[in-house]
Image (spheres, rainbow, N blue to C red):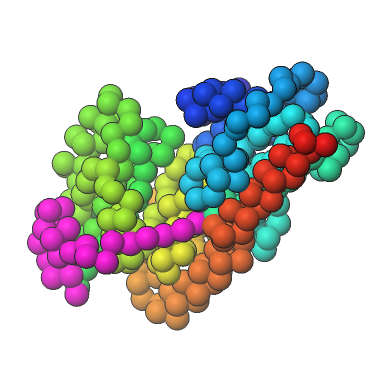
Amino acid sequence: MPLTLKAHLRLQTSSWLRTARLPWLFTSIGEAGFCKATESLLESSLEELMSMKMPTREKRTPSWAEFLRKPGRHETSINICRKYSGAFWKGGTTGSKGRKTQSWEGSSRSQPQAKGKIYVQSQGIATTPNAAFNWNTFLRRSEINQSADNLHIFLLICGLRQVKDPLYLVDAFSEWHQEEPSVYLVIAGPEVDPVFTREVKAKVRRAAGVRLIGEMPQEDLHAVVKNCFAVVNSSVSEGMSAAILEAMDLEVPVLARNIPGNAAVVKHEVTGLLFSNPQEFVHLAKRLLSDPALEKEIVVNGREYVRMYHSWQVERDTYQQLIRKLEGSTED
């Protein structure tokens, strides 16, 4: 099993659930959402989960529809929840034309008792940029001492850990910056792996045109996304990158490493640009800078894609409907 899957497969039950004594099983799989091992693991556990005997529900239980009324109360990539009736749902992904990138039809065939109990719901996206955010102040704090009018900021949003590969583009970008001083790569995110963080900081200190900033409040980060020229993803593995979808929602172009997780939501030259190596990234970034028509097309298509397939309102409504259905089934 890949290390990323081991690291991000975790069984968790919140204190709220434990207090309520509700028999929900909540499994979250992050970066390894597209590993075949993930799907086979979930399929193999499906029969066991559905055969579990669940205790009788206590009378005074808070409404689950209330608990999940607001977006963001559940983790994304893959969510599998089970209640008394044995129903499941999955927060899945949808490809650039609405295709489901992780099929559960096989699960239904191999586990006939699961038919009609599996639902696919794509991750919903909501962006809230801070209207009071000062872009010029941000640039000064990032030690970028140029006029904002002449700058092109490429923003890489990631926690500092190896699976995100934040150093993948540093050398190539630094060389490009020396040719074109108006381009900067800004890496933004929390220091997840202390050892790897030291390596990243040491590398960035020596790299011209590359800046490293720490974790930011979400509203401020959305404001940075809205002001930058493009959002970059250089991960080795992704489930479904919220940063990519948020950039699309904020009408900012996306350049993403060509891996299955990214290619599922970014269609090359339609909703973004996909690169397979640092040199190709620089080539595509230069092309994006010199082709306003391409930039506009990508932005329009990306925004429409998120609106159609990643609406947070649709995600919320789907979860509420499923919860009401499950609650109703326990009263029968």
Q: Position of residue 269 (x, y in %)?
A: 53, 68
Q: Position of residue 211 (x, y in %)?
A: 21, 49
Q: Is residue 157 magenta?
A: no
**130 left or right of 86 in image:** left
The answer to whether residue 6 is visible is: no
> Looking at the image, is 208 positioned above or below residue 10?
below
Residue drawn at point x = 43 percent, y = 74 percent = 295
Which residue is at the far front?
59
Q: Position of residue 194 (x, y in %)?
A: 27, 26
Image quarter hosting the C terminus: top right
Residue drawn at point x = 36 percent, y = 76 percent = 290
> Looking at the image, is 111 positioned above or below residue 151?
above
> Which of the 4 image quadrants contains residue 293?
bottom left
**47 left or right of 163 in image:** right
Q: Position of residue 144 (x, y in %)?
A: 14, 58
Q: Looking at this view, is 116 or 320 the one in front? A: 320
Q: Looking at this view, is 59 or 199 the one in front? A: 59
Q: Is residue 139 magenta?
A: yes
> Looking at the image, is 330 positioned above or below residue 71?
above
Residue drawn at point x = 50 percent, y = 75 percent = 300
Residue drawn at point x = 27 percent, y = 56 percent = 220
Q: Main secondary structure of the magenta part?
A: loop
Q: Looking at this view, is 176 or 35 the one in front? A: 35
Q: Which residues are magenta?
A: 125-149
